[in-house]
Image: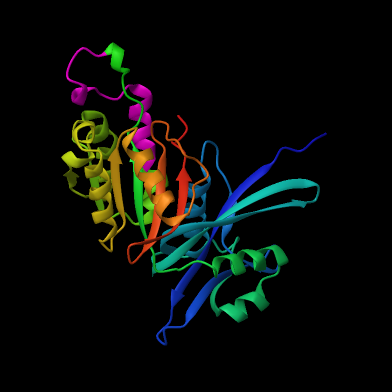
């Protein structure tokens, strides 16, 4: 009988010690007597990045902020195919303790020590890929609003067009995938469908919404440069930010970034609730990750 694919996710957790030297957190699992990065299987209807964030907390007790997607591993264990995706994660604080039956040690190692300590050669390849990224990055999330009522089904002002039930569910579930980036600001078009998309996130994170007319379709129709210039200004802020807007505004902004930097995304279109995560350092883009809308 063919075994179904087991999907899992994890993170490479890093910090700088008092001597400003880079250190990596590894876990020891007594069941396997091995050293590895924290990772685990996806729960039902869970997406990879949310699973990685949850597993970090369960296996280390660390609060972290995620950075770029690093890569994935595909391998077989006892005839079962596994796929594991990894993200970079900056250590913030220790807020809990790992489950002792799963993890009996969480230790910090230098890069060379971690490479020697890791039990699986595949994990070493993930560590080497991790080292190719500039770690001190911020995230700018270009979020398309969730699923709204169709234009031809709405007779009022288009800016007042609301989310439908599926969109409302998407909005509630976006927190699980976007909170991992340590969101500090939320900017939104004043359109109701954008406001309704980011309001659950803002309330959960206790953030005030910043309404930006320059992210609206009305302003874009008059001056297509204004949304792009607004987003460029957000990149100058050393914060992790959500900017919720519309098609075709966000794809045009992404295409301008691609033309300027040569850094591409795995997806060039956004469906409702999808997002691009622009990772940048000192106003320079280092990676662009795609996040699909939450399943509902």
The residue under the point 57% across, 70% down is 26
Image quarter (top left, top right, bottom left or bottom right) of the C terminus: top left
Which residues are the magenta region?
Answer: 154-174
195 sits left or right of 11 in the view: left
Q: Quadrant of residue 123?
A: bottom right
Examine the structure image and report whether residue 163 is included in the region drawn in magenta: yes
Examine the structure image and report whether residue 214 is included in the region drawn in magenta: no
Image quarter (top left, top right, bottom left or bottom right) of the N terminus: top right
123 vs 93, nearest the viewer = 123
x and y, in percent, of residue 7 in the image: 63, 45
Q: Is residue 162 above or below residue 247?
A: above
Q: Is residue 32 above or below residue 53?
A: below
Principal secondary structure, stretch drawn in magenta = helix
Q: How many marks?
A: 0
x and y, in percent, of residue 290 in the image: 47, 45
The residue under the point 23% across, 46% down is 187
x and y, in percent, of residue 182 in the image: 34, 57
110 vs 224, nearest the viewer = 224
- On the question of residue 108 being in view, the answer is yes
Colour scheme shown: rainbow
Q: Is residue 274 above or below residue 177?
A: above
Q: Is residue 47 above or below residue 166?
A: below
The residue under the point 34% across, 22% down is 165
x and y, in percent, of residue 256 in the image: 37, 47
89 vs 248, nearest the viewer = 248
- On the question of residue 203 being in view, the answer is no
């Amino acid at each position: 009988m063919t075994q179904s694919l087991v999907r899992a996710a994890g993170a490479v957790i890093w910090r700088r010690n008092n001597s400003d030297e880079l250190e990596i957190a590894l876990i020891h699992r007594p069941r396997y007597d091995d050293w590895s990065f924290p990772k685990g299987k996806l729960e039902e209807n869970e997406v990879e990045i949310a699973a990685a964030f949850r597993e970090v907390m369960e296996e280390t007790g660390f609060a972290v902020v995620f950075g770029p997607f690093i890569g994935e591993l595909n391998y077989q264990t006892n005839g079962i195919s596994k796929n594991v995706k990894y993200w970079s994660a900056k250590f913030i604080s220790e807020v809990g303790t790992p489950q002792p039956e799963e993890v009996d040690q969480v230790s910090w190692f230098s890069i060379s020590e971690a490479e020697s300590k890791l039990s699986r050669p595949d994990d070493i390849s993930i560590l080497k890929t991790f080292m190719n990224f500039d770690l001190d990055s911020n995230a700018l999330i270009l979020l398309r609003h969730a699923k709204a009522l169709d234009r031809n089904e709405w007779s009022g002002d288009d800016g007042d067009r609301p989310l439908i039930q599926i969109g409302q569910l998407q909005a509630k579930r976006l927190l699980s995938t976007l909170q991992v980036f340590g969101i500090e600001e939320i900017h939104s078009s004043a359109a109701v469908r954008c406001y309704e998309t980011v309001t659950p996130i803002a309330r959960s994170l206790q953030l005030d919404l910043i309404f930006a007319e320059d992210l609206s379709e009305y302003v874009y129709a008059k001056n297509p440069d204004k949304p792009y210039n607004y987003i460029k200004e957000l990149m100058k802020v050393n914060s992790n930010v959500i900017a919720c807007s519309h098609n075709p505004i966000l794809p045009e902004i992404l295409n301008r970034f691609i033309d300027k930097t040569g850094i591409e995304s795995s997806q060039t279109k956004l469906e409702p609730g999808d997002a691009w995560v622009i990772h940048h350092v000192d106003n320079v883009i280092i990676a662009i990750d795609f996040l699909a809308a939450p399943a509902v």
